[in-house]
Amino acid sequence: MTLFVISILIGCLSVMNVQGRRGKWPQGMPVTRPRLVAVGGTFEGSRGRPSDAYVIQERLVATADGGTGAEAAHVAAALALAAVIAGRPQHGGTREQDLDDYVQAAHRAVRNAALRNPAVPGLASTLDLIVLDGGESPRLRFAHVGNGSIWHCPRGGTPAPLTTSHSFDDGPPLRALGRPSALNAEVGSVAVRPGDRVVMMTDGVVQALGVKRVTELLTGTASPVACLDRLYDELAAVEPKEDATVVIADFVTV
């Protein structure tokens, strides 16, 4: 089991490769490359049971929460993200529904692991995924399963969630990767402009701080690092029991 977990976690380590044209770029010519500039972190819950994982790439950000019921919750989250990374959705189709293919691949990865290993039959995970599409009309496509959330923070506007929680009253998610039933992911897209921000968080953040306070903390022009620090300060004050993961990404074109 140890080697299995290590191999999965290594597979989730993301290294961003930027490939440009061969040869010398003309001196003084600016290079424009739409991308996400992101920072993230997991505030570890006081129960000491790791459950969350996240990945950041140039045009892809994803978070996963393996929940609190399984002994190896972090394995479920790692499996989900490994499947997403292997699929490279930022290089696939550009329809909203295309993201569902990668969600289903992650679903199968978690489900197959549970079936192969009787010791961890309850493996399940949430998944939140965004992909940046550049071009003349840039947009963020997203896919969502579970009780995490994705927020859009337009430059100069009010932060608002793009997704709805698949749970009732902070309970366990009604939809999750790895469960026997068929999976119906929530997919969509939103147009973005330079300076817009997208924020992903697992349910531990909203449960600890509340929607109103999260909205207040996401409002303003602070840098991603400063915004993350503010969230961490407030999480430290309330000491959440569950892991609380936040990824903050700004859309830039320079």
Image: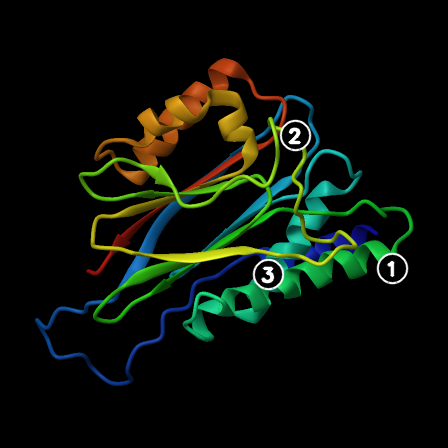
Look at the picture and state if 182 lies above or below 197: below
Q: Give the residue at the far top of this rendering.
A: 237
Residue 61: horizontal and vertical position, in percent? 45, 54
For marks 1 and 3, give the CA distance.
Answer: 20 Å
Where disc 3 sits, the SS reads helix
Residue 8: horizontal and vertical position, in percent? 69, 57
Can residue 7 be seen in the rendering of this structure? no
Name the quadrant containing residue 40: top left
For marks 1 and 2, give the CA distance.
Answer: 28 Å
The residue wearing badge 2 is 171
Mark whose residue sits in front, 1 or 2: 2
Q: Is residue 235 left or right of residue 106?
A: left
- Quarter holding the C terminus is bottom left
| Mark number, residue 198 | none
Q: What residue type is disc 1 on?
A: Arg
The residue wearing badge 3 is 103
Where disc 2 sits, the SS reads loop
Can residue 87 be seen in the rendering of this structure? yes
Taking the spot 44% from the left edge, 68% from the top edge, the residue there is 90
N-term mark: 1 or 3: 3
The residue wearing badge 1 is 116
Q: Nearer the viewer, residue 7 or 252?
A: 252
Mark 3 and mark 2 residues within 8 Å of each other at the beta carbon: no
Name the quadrant containing residue 49: top right
Q: What residue type is disc 3 on?
A: Val
N-term mark: 1 or 2: 1
Q: Give the residue at the far bottom of this rendering.
A: 23
Q: Is residue 186 left or right of residue 251?
A: right
Q: Is residue 219 left or right of residue 86?
A: left
